[in-house]
Amino acid sequence: MILLQEEIMQKQAAGAMPLSLAFVPTVARAACIDTLLLVLFLTVGLSAQQTPPSAGSDATWRFAVSGDSRNCGDIVMPAIAQGVRRDGAAFYWHLGDYRAIYMIDEDYAHAHPGSDISDYLANAWPDFIAHQLSPFADTAVFLALGNHELISPKSREACTIQFADWLNQPVLQKQRLADDPSDHLIKTYYHWIDRGVDFITLDNSSPDQLDLAQTAWLTAVLQRAADNPNVRTIVLGMHAALPDSFSAGHSMNDSAQQEFTGRTLYASLVAFRKKTNKNVYVVASHSHYLMSNIYATACHPKDKVLPGWLIGSAGAVRYILPKEHAAGGVASTNVYGYLLGTVAQDGTIQFEFKPVKEPDIPASVVKEFSKEQVHWCFESNKLNYQVAGPTCAPVVCATCTQ
């Protein structure tokens, strides 16, 4: 996960800051992760309950999800919040990249003319909270980390401190302590169970993730979901898509470590679904467009395709769609909006894209940022960058699965 040089050049952002996220695991650490991931695959895949879950009696309900709200998020996100509340969604799930950080976001620059990079870095996250989270009012918001949250001088620790109110909100704290009464650490990965659906937020915002600790935690979460007859469905939300999707060039394929851990997790999820007969869905952002059925590539046999969506459409600069995506489903770029998930009584989820168009921007936002800036975000916030597709090259390691 690195910044695109084409984007930096086109933005001409003076003082842009490079990512410092290189990770080279030691032999010992890599061996431990290999071993634990094998346990993840075997434990969840082979030991899960095979009894179909009961239907339950909860009524149909909704939630919303999208990600990547840098660049024009201060303009687009209030409209997303307006739509989410109108749709009666139980919560909104943000999949990362709140602000650009390596440059001043265009919406911020317009609202704060003359600001330098120091002023911007000090206020970027409070600005995100004020303009993008506050409009949700009493609708719950859950946050995942994106790679832009870790651009220096920002860090995972700084992010945990700044967004502690969201990462440790009561429902998450309650779930964490129910899983382990001695676990009092706020983490950037977490889960919560709502009406038979286990929502799992992963942190794959840097090349060292999924690391040993997160993998151990995820192993336990999936095993409990397999054993719990009241859990009918799991939904995994993350910033970068799992490897070998139609958007592989901008996903967990970007680092050898993530490619391995991501492929192992994918195999475990397929095994989980087969052994438990429970529903599995995967949502991600990172690539700035809308795509459905993203794992229906030549890398996966038809019976091993997980339902997957890319929804990086909350305000970030839009990319060109991958060249090969016809075998998937819905695919659209130069759009803003969110996915609305409707959960049925049996735990199945129908996802619908809810677009945000220029006339949907609240009048107060237009007044603050001007009609010209709002129009620029809809007409000009795009980049001539096309994400590469999957190569489906075999992974060379003893414990990897195809």
Image (cartoon, rainbow, N blue to C red):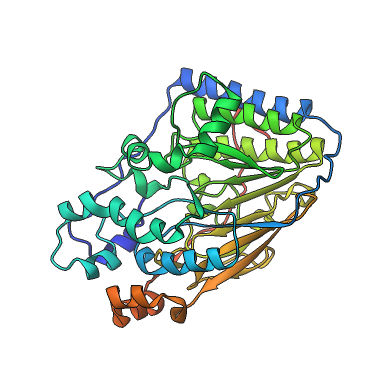
Front in this rendered view, residue 65 or 34: 65
Q: Residue at x 33, y 62 (%)?
A: 7
Residue 373 falls left or right of residue 40: left
Work out whether 350 lies above or below 221: below
- Residue at (66% x, 53% y) in the render: 295
Q: Is residue 99 visible?
A: no
Residue 220 showing in the rendered view: yes
Position of 230 relative to 92 (above/below) = above
Q: How many marks?
A: 0
Q: Quadrant of residue 369?
A: bottom left
Q: Residue at x 38, y 64 (%)?
A: 73
Find residue 39 and report its image quarter. top right
Name the residue located 42 percent from the left edge and 22 percent from the top edge: 26
Q: Could you tell whether 109 is left or right of 265 in the image? A: left
Q: Is 73 on the left or on the right of 242, as rendered?
A: left
- The image shows residue 106 at horizontal and vertical percentages of 28, 67
Give the x, y percent position of residue 391: 59, 51
Rendering coords of residue 315 (x, y %): 41, 65
Vertical placement of residue 291 versus 117, above or below: below
Of residue 296 and residue 372, the one placed in the foreground of this image is: 372
User: How far from the left and from the top, in percent, is residue 271?
Assistant: 75, 36
Q: Against 376, is 69 above or below?
A: above
Query: Given the current orientation, which residue lies at the most extreme right position?
Result: 51
Q: Nearer the viewer, residue 2 or 273?
A: 273
Q: Is residue 13 left or right of residue 166?
A: left
Q: Quadrant of residue 131?
A: bottom left
- For the view shown, which residue lies furthest in the front direction? 138
The C terminus lies in quadrant: top right
